[in-house]
Image (cartoon, grey):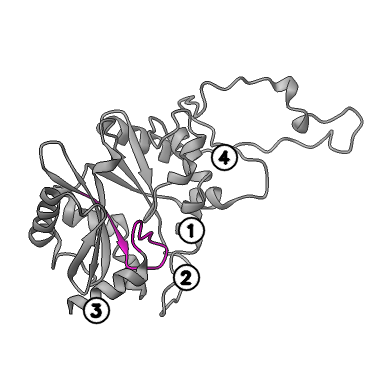
Amino acid sequence: MKEEDINGCQIQEWYPNFKSISIKTLIHELPESFIQYLLDDSGPFLLPRSITNDDALPNRVHKPEEEEDFVALEGSEDEAEEPTPPPSFPELEMEIKASIETLGGAVFPKLNWSAPKDSAWISSTGNLKCTSFSEIALLLRSSDSVVHDLCHAYDSCEDKTSSRPSVFFLALRKWYPSLHPEMEFRCFVRNKLLLGFVNERKCELNTMIEDFFVEKVKGKFGSESYTFDVYVTKDGRVKLLDFNPWGASTLPLLFTWDELEEKSGRRR
């Protein structure tokens, strides 16, 4: 795998060419100060100070008198130490607030490659639905998948020249509460051939997704081998959700990569 295969799967790279068949998305370039905030684990876990007073955890019971770890005992050496002030990103927060409103009031976030699915448990809703900058920051700061984007995206590349891209982006994708996970499919393409996808037993969907690949994706994406995720709506439309590189950290789900490679060899 080469760096160009990884780079082509960044949402800011592929979305402009496929937005007519994907879900509505607005993309923001992130300042380096925010990236360093996401990576900083040297102190307490602090959410950015919100200039709009949004709270990522509105249902929590806040009892300062019980927070013993942050109370300096009288006469202790820590008595004169000031608590670490939370960071603030006012310009980014206002840009994101405007995008959330444009997208109907709720979004789910992802960075160049990954959504913070592994940290959904920490949100007040238990999923990736976000209505504020504070909720987005909470998910991103808590996610190991995001750390992979920030530090390890090129680890599997044979021509690796850097550990991270020079710029990171935040994609805000319109939240659809009625989506059914069982109608989302990961499709596997090797040497420009569609090898298959998860849940091939549904014959009607099989034809629908194959036609979508031939008409909308094949020859239009930069790599020859990759995976792409689609969602099939109730009225039979196929929506493109994401592209991922072949192999590396991409999950093959019900397949193994060895099975897919063997299947690819039989199709040649």
Of 237 and 93, which appears nearest the observer? 237
Region of the chain picked out in magenta, as a range: 240-255
- Is residue 129 found inside the magenta-colored segment of the image? no
Name the amino acid, label 3: Gly
In the rendered structure, find residue 148 and report the number of the disc placed on it: 1
Q: Amino acid at mark 1?
A: His
Is residue 254 one of those drawn in magenta?
A: yes
Mark 1 vs mark 3, foreground winner is 3
Number of the front mark, 2 or 4: 2
Q: Nearer the viewer, mark 3 or mark 2?
A: 3
Q: Amino acid at mark 4?
A: Pro
Does label 2 or label 1 sit earlier along the sequence? 1
State the residue lying farthest toward the front: 201
Mark 1 is surrounded, within 10 Å at the Cα level, by few (under 14), some (14 to 19) or many (20 or more) other residues, namely some
**Numbered disc 3: secondary structure:** helix
Query: How many neighbours does mark 2 have within 10 angstroms: few (below 14), some (14-19), or many (20 or more)?
Result: some
Q: Quadrant of residue 127?
A: top left
The percent coordinates of residue 222 (x first, y second) are 21, 69
Numbered tag placed on residue 59 in the rendering: none
Distance Cα–Cα, label 2 vs label 1: 9 Å
Give residue 124's position: percent from left, percent from top.
Answer: 48, 28
Question: Which residue has dot 3 on it?
Answer: 265
> Which label's residue is closer to the chain start, 2 or 4?
4
Look at the numbered discs 3 and 2 and tell me whether their residues touch, using CB distance below 8 Å.
no
Q: Secondary structure at mark 4?
A: loop
Which residue matches tag 2?
155
Main SS of the magenta part reads loop
> Disc 2, disc 1: CB below 8 Å?
no
